[in-house]
Image (cartoon, rainbow, N blue to C red):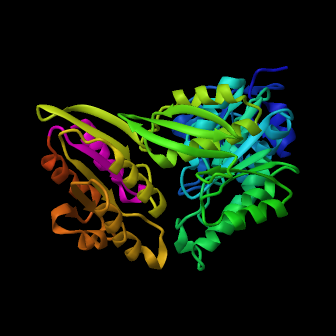
Amino acid sequence: MTSALWTFDELAQATGGTFTGLAGQGGEATGITFDSRQVARGDIFLALKGVRDGHDFVPMAFQSGAAVAITRRPVEGGPCLLVPDVQKALEDLAVFARDRAPNARRGAVTGSVGKTSVTQMVMQGLSRAGRAHSAVKSFNNHIGVPLTLARMPRDTERAVFEIGMNHANEITPLSEFVAPHAVVITTVGAVHTENFPDGEAGVARAKAEIFDGLLPGGLAVLNADNSWFDFLSGQARAAGALIATFGEHGSCDAQLVEHRVNGDRAGIAARFHGRDIVFSLSHTGRHQAVNALATLLMLEALDVDLDTSLLALESFATLEGRGKVVTKPFKGGELTVVDESYNANPVSMTATLKSFGDRDKGNGRKVVVLSDMLELGPDEAALHAGLAATIGALDIDRVYLAGPLMKHLWDALPESLRGGYAANAADLTNTVTEDLRAGDLVMIKGSNGSKAGLIAKALLSA
């Protein structure tokens, strides 16, 4: 059996395409990508249509060593596999790759917050248990999910896939591509609500689409603490799923009993199917302790033993922009930065603020720097202003805000907490850097589109 990711014969068989510009018979490819800047020698290049037509980048891909390009028309520079629709060809490759690894146990993760963290925690456990596969980063959309499947080696034993959405009817086809044996819905909250006239109810229905691809008798891992649990469990049962629960309820299959923060780690006591367990995490947020319990149930469903799963959680490192803690020299002392800048919504913002509030600040101050939360629809002003009550109940000393939506929070904050406000993240950066002192503990969070990452990057390089 070949060790190549794809043979040319398989590419033709999967897509029904025909080759042009191919010298001789056969051929192999070792990877697949749609980004010409990331082409490695031996890759398949997908000429997908984005802001620009991917066919414009085929010559560059060949110059970088692409073995073949999947295109709608011939392009000079190397062999092309001609297909009517490159996106459809990618989806065909995804299904073919899934089916040629029939013994691989597959899991899928969705939810309003925590998808990437849970997916990567699960992958940590799968990697310890055997030949495992997942996305290299948060590839969770109509391109990323089939691409991750198309990259799955034929000898994979276990795999996990993150599935996201912005609108209704996006998760169903992705779940059907994956055909998972188990799925997790981390939680449902007010995220992307501008695209759902009925708000969270529409989000809950969209998340429940993950059951559409679940294999018969598969497992649905659900958050018993979430207000949409009854709806989701009903949808799961209607799809023929078994159900496992996680959360802080005593009746959960995986129940959080105790969560204690000790420096940059959290100590966790839990009950797993009635068995008392203890472990620690590098992420100190209580919400991540709950996510870890969902991870344990998913790993169990994918045939990973509990001891291996616990070791994986102990060794799991926080991800860039998702709670990574960095202590660095600053103004003659040290500054501790909690980087939560990857994304934000009301659910994750509240959980992260509470987690930050629980941290020991030593002799310094606790400072939060927030940028706009996006895609919240008509309630966006109230959802931003409503954070004032959360912040006011926590041990937080100063608040810096960026963006037109965060102006609503600025107006709702007491004068004593106001550190600084700017119309955008870039304009706030200098103010924050100048005002911070040695010994401070600072947390940065906001939506990707509101550029909280610019502030985090500036502080980490200051």
Give the x, y percent position of residue 94.
76, 44
Give the x, y percent position of residue 385.
34, 72
Image side of residue 124 versus residue 9, left or right: left
Give the x, y percent position of residue 416.
16, 63
Pick the front one: 252 or 414 = 252
For the point 39% across and 54% down, which residue is it? 354
Image side of residue 397 versus residue 284, left or right: left
Give the extent of the magenta segment.
438-462
Image side of residue 91 versus residue 39, left or right: right
Give the x, y percent position of residue 387.
36, 66
Q: Is residue 458 magenta?
A: yes
Image quadrant in which the C terminus is located: top left
The picture quadrant where one finds residue 19 is top right
For the point 16% across and 67% down, which residue is it? 415
Q: Is residue 101 magenta?
A: no
The picture quadrant where one finds residue 209 is bottom right
Indicate whether 235 appears above or below 291: below
For the point 46% across and 61% down, which residue is it? 345
Indicate whether 324 appears above or below 153: below
Q: Does residue 248 appear in this view?
A: yes
For the point 18% across and 42% down, which residue is it? 364
